[in-house]
Image (tube, rainbow, N blue to C red):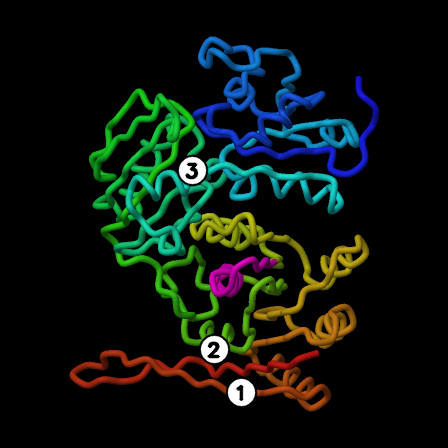
């Protein structure tokens, strides 16, 4: 074993299906000089450091290769700190790869990176698509529902997929979602000598014998896609009638003003429609929905799944005041936006006011006389804006048209 080194001890290398032949001189030198090389079994084999050396004759063929643990852990890499170590990943390790997960645990100057051509670049080149106009998604470890917010006729998508069965499952999902007319080009082992392609409409895709690694290029056709304005139709959400209705939801989202990276507490969440549209409105946002009833909490969970937002929306069952107190006691950072759609009380608003930081946006809706009085008092004490919203929907009334008038909604919004 060599002596510990100073400076960068870790080299992160993107390797393609062409193995060592596709690597730059610096990448090859780092592999040759490393004490340990981490990677998935396929990556190690491509570099001649795995068991299946016959598939890539002429490679290094030694025993320094170390497969990732299952479940994945970066700790074995950290245990090699200050020893010459290499990590192999697919293509560009920092585009839906392991690079970001690894370097988040390191300090600047501990690593160098030699990325290869990403699968997205390789496929875009073969399709003749401009990458800046193409949506690139990593669906090898994420549900297809994450495409729900972005699919629309003419939208071009390149996505990595989990395994050999995934293309058929993707085709079925697209068809069931109204996008059966979409063109799918499935790519196997792109960039290497065993590269293959299959082309079909999603609703007639029946190819078999596909092997990983696999990705797909999709030109979406069929359904209209999800509207991008606030206020989705109520029937888009699983609900039992306890839902912030579309026009009021649009007004509430306007008052919440979601921005990149914001976090939301959605109190008395009902169906979770406010949380869902908050997350759809801005990237990298997160929400926590508080709901006392388990059946309604299940609707929130289902709506998060339907819109591909399960990884960004947490559902907590219980009384909001008690659950917020527990969260704060664990050291959880408070949000910068709060929506109170149900269960408002003077005690709850006082708790929220105490635990959230200055600059937090708070929006509360009231439909009962008691809560209306509460919000009027809070507006008097803390300022902000107070709206009274009255809605009426046209409805047949014999040979005439009448109006179905909903109970007025009082909305208080304030910045802490």
Q: Residue furthest front?
A: 25
User: Seen in the image, is 355 located left or right of residue 58?
Assistant: right
Q: Secondary structure at mark 2?
A: helix
Which tag is nearer the camera, tag 3 or tag 1? 3
User: Seen in the image, is 171 located left or right of residue 302?
Assistant: left
Q: Mark 3 and mark 2: span between their CA atoms?
A: 42 Å
Q: Residue at x 31, y 57 (%)?
A: 225
Q: Secondary structure at mark 1?
A: strand
Residue hosting label 2: 251
Task: Pick whichever of labels 2 and 1 is earlier in the sequence.
Answer: 2
Task: Pick whichever of labels 3 and 1 is earlier in the sequence.
Answer: 3
Which residue occupies the foreground of this view, 382 or 55?
55
Q: Residue at x 57, y 60 (%)?
A: 285
Residue 133: image location, x then y, percent: 36, 56
* In the image, residue 278 lies in the stretch drawn in magenta: yes
Q: Secondary structure at mark 3?
A: helix
- Tell me the quarter of the picture where residue 2 sits: top right
| Numbered label attached to residue 387 | 1
For the record, the magenta segment spans 270-287
Q: Residue at x 64, y 83 (%)?
A: 375
Which tag is nearer the camera, tag 2 or tag 1? 2
Query: Could you tell me if residue 291 is visible in this image?
Result: no
| Numbered label attached to residue 211 | none
Query: Could you tell me if residue 318 is visible in this image?
Result: yes
Residue 95: image location, x then y, percent: 52, 44
Which residue occupies the foreground of this view, 200 or 389?
200
Q: Residue at x 69, y 84 (%)?
A: 378
Q: Mark 3 and mark 1: span between their CA atoms?
A: 51 Å
- Tell me the quarter of the picture where residue 65 sits: top right
Residue hosting label 3: 119
């Amino acid at each position: 074993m060599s002596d510990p080194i100073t400076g960068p001890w870790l080299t992160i290398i993107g390797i393609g299906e062409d193995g060592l032949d596709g690597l730059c001189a610096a990448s090859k030198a780092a592999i040759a000089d490393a004490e340990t090389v981490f990677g998935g079994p396929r990556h190690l084999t491509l570099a001649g450091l795995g068991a299946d050396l016959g598939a890539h004759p002429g490679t290094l063929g030694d025993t320094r290769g170390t497969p990732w643990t299952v479940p994945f852990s970066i700790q074995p890499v950290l245990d090699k700190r200050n020893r010459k170590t290499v990590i192999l990943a697919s293509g560009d390790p920092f585009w839906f790869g392991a690079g970001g997960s690894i370097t988040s645990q390191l300090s600047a100057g501990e690593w160098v990176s030699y990325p290869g051509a990403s699968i997205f670049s390789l496929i875009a080149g073969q399709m003749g698509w401009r990458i800046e106009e193409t949506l690139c998604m990593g669906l090898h470890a994420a549900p297809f529902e994450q495409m729900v917010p972005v699919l629309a006729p003419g939208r071009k998508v390149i996505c990595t997929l989990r395994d050999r069965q995934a293309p058929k499952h993707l085709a079925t999902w697209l068809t069931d979602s109204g996008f059966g007319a979409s063109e799918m080009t499935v790519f196997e082992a792109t960039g290497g000598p065993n590269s293959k392609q299959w082309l079909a409409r999603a609703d007639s895709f029946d190819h078999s014998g596909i092997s990983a690694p696999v990705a797909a290029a999709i030109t979406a056709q069929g359904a209209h896609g999800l509207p991008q304005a606030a206020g989705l139709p109520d029937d888009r959400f699983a609900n039992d009638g306890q839902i912030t209705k579309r026009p009021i939801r649009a007004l509430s989202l306007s008052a919440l003003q979601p921005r990149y990276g914001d976090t939301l507490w959605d109190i008395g969440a009902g169906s979770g429609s406010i949380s869902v549209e908050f997350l759809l409105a801005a990237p990298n946002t997160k929400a926590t929905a508080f709901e006392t009833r388990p059946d309604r909490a299940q609707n929130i969970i289902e709506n998060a799944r339907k819109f591909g937002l399960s990884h960004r929306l947490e559902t907590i069952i219980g009384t909001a005041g008690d659950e917020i107190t527990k969260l704060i006691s664990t050291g959880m950072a408070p949000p910068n936006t709060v929506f109170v759609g149900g269960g408002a009380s003077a005690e709850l608003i006082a708790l929220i006011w105490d635990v959230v930081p200055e600059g937090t946006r708070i929006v509360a809706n009231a439909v009962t006389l008691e809560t209306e009085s509460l919000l009027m008092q809070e507006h008097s004490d803390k300022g902000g804006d107070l709206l009274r919203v009255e809605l009426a929907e046209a409805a047949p009334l014999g040979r005439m048209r009448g109006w179905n008038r909903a109970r007025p909604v009082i909305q208080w919004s304030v910045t802490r």
